[in-house]
Image: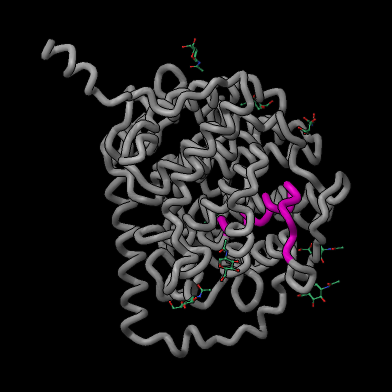
Amino acid sequence: MIFLSWLFLLPLVAGIEVDWSSQSSINDGLALIAKGLMDYYNGNDTGQTPGMFSNPYYWWEAGAAWNSMVDYWYYTGDTTYNSIIMSSLQFQVGDYWDYMPSNQTTTEGNDDQGFWGITVMAAAEKNFDDPREDQPGWVYLAQAVFNTMAARWDEENCAGGLRWQIFTWNNGYDYKNTVSNGCLFNLAARLARYTQNDTYIEWADRVWDWTKSVGFIIDTNEWWPVYDGGFIQNNCTDIEPIEWTYNSGLMMSGAAVMYNYTNDPIWLNRTQGIWNRARVFFLPGGIMYEAACQPSSQCNNDQRSFKGIFSRFLGLTSLMAPTLSPEIQQYLANSSIAAAQSCSGGTDGHTCGLDWSRGGWDGLYGLGEQMSALEVMQNRLVWTRPPPLTEDTGAVSVSNGSAGTVQEQRPVVEHLTLDTKDRAGAGIITAIVLIMLLISAWWLAF
Ligand SMILES: *[C@@H]1O[C@H](CO)[C@@H](O)[C@H](O)[C@H]1NC(C)=O
Ligand SMILES: *[C@@H]1O[C@H](CO)[C@@H](O)[C@H](O)[C@H]1NC(C)=O
Ligand SMILES: *[C@@H]1O[C@H](CO)[C@@H](O)[C@H](O)[C@H]1NC(C)=O
Ligand SMILES: *[C@@H]1O[C@H](CO)[C@@H](O)[C@H](O)[C@H]1NC(C)=O
Ligand SMILES: *[C@@H]1O[C@H](CO)[C@@H](O)[C@H](O)[C@H]1NC(C)=O
Ligand SMILES: *[C@@H]1O[C@H](CO)[C@@H](O)[C@H](O)[C@H]1NC(C)=O
Ligand SMILES: *[C@@H]1O[C@H](CO)[C@@H](O)[C@H](O)[C@H]1NC(C)=O
Ligand SMILES: *[C@@H]1O[C@H](CO)[C@@H](O)[C@H](O)[C@H]1NC(C)=O
């Protein structure tokens, strides 16, 4: 009897139960996870900053999380969070409408800005309610991010590419990495498809070719790894061979969009090459994991969200290169079942974990864990809604190729007024990020 009652007291470890043949069951599951994600948002409370998630989540991750929430609305039709999404995307837009708000500019990197740009791109492609008419629309903002980033293209070092950091005083200013260039590439491909302006095609070609030429992408096998980056002191040849899911996803889905728009088989070849290699991000049984940090339990807060971003790009790749969709969707299906059962933790009983292969919750929780579970599940639904819209297929957000090109007017006060304390702070933060990156770079030789 004692045994029996002990059994009854065992917590349910079933996680979030979803009947994948029922849209309402799927929606119920996603709603719980989305609610959990939004538990980390207190930007609308007194004294907090709209658009920002609570400590310790950096600004970039907030940008990425809003994309998860735009997509949540798109796939479920649940408008509960739309006004918060809208006000957040607008509050952080910055004085020059390019996602360089002055609060962030001491530490902002190209990748940070890029992820907000990708979020507003998604909002445009999905006809998420455009801002009021006197405000710049979603695609304008994406173009402003693109134009400000493209203007930083640096031919002086490594024969091209974006640096990781925007500002000289940040550690990582001397590092060129895939995520920064991948954001530019992804935006270029999607803006080309959205606007049919060939300037973006030229940029997508330029970024791809450079990234490949320095060896951040290796295209000599059937499976193409996407590496992290290299330092300009060494002409970008000292490549950090870490493979992050989201870097693969940025390049793969950008290539898929290029394929869809240009119909050029070379882009399908590139998409396929990266997808072939991306199988290293799945455990046996097709369960996604962050291979570079999960096995050693070294994933930091940023890295814990990467599976979510990767899942989103897998969804986009399915849509843009439909021949790959059946296979990609199988991996998403198996991963999403594993993710859902990990969502059995916390005080609410449905907090999601990091390791989806455990059979239950692993005790970890956070914004990244919620984003990842939400995205892997909702990207199984990509075929239930229209594919990303373009100006020709009903997108309403109005493009403007000059967005973000009035940079000359941006005062350089950041450089002049930044006091030593701020500068040290900014340097330390990026130093820590960089050290974390390098520490977790002791890594699996696949
Ligand atoms: C959140 O705050 C923003 C900015 O102050 C405001 O525009 C918005 O209406 C608020 N949203 C909600 C749901 O309270
Ligand atoms: C910038 O920081 C100040 C002080 O914390 C805050 O009041 C303001 O809302 C922030 N603005 C943005 C755009 O984040
Ligand atoms: C630096 O790298 C670029 C791109 O890989 C290459 O074209 C260039 O020749 C290299 N320069 C030197 C000095 O090695
Ligand atoms: C890409 O195309 C090349 C040349 O046709 C071919 O040898 C290679 O197998 C293709 N790679 C992938 C991943 O499909
Ligand atoms: C997904 O799971 C099914 C059932 O366990 C298995 O047969 C299949 O091989 C898995 N797919 C992948 C891609 O691992
Ligand atoms: C481009 O994407 C659309 C929407 O998913 C799809 O119907 C079409 O077949 C794709 N084009 C190519 C060349 O794969
Ligand atoms: C095409 O895009 C580029 C880059 O944003 C811009 O400079 C140019 O004005 C655009 N052309 C048109 C016709 O909109
Ligand atoms: C396009 O954006 C530029 C820069 O913000 C602005 O000066 C111009 O008036 C805009 N054009 C249109 C047609 O809105």
Q: Residue at x 85, y 47 (%)?
A: 394
Q: Which part of the image, by quadrant, shows the C terminus?
A: top left
Q: Can residue 353 be seen in this view?
A: no
Residue nearest the viewer, comparing 60 with 16? 16
**In this rendering, would 147 be left or right of 339?**
right
Q: Which residue is drawn at 79% across and 69% down?
A: 133
Q: Residue at x 27, y 49 (%)?
A: 439
Identify the image's colour scheme: rainbow, by chain, secondary structure or one colour: one colour
Q: How many marks?
A: 0
Q: Which part of the image, by quadrant, shows the N terminus?
A: top left
Q: Residue furthest right?
A: 392
Is 117 magenta? The answer is yes
Is 107 magenta? The answer is no
Q: Position of residue 14 (x, y in %)?
A: 37, 23
Q: Can residue 67 be seen in this view?
A: yes
**In this rendering, would 435 be left or right of 204?**
left
| Up-down relation of residue 199 to residue 46 (above or below) | above
Q: Position of residue 115 (x, y in %)?
A: 56, 55
The residue stretch that appears in magenta: 114-131
| Up-down relation of residue 143 to residue 28 (above or below) | below
**In this rendering, would 408 be left or right of 25?**
right
Q: Position of residue 179 (x, y in %)?
A: 51, 51
Q: Main secondary structure of the magenta part?
A: helix
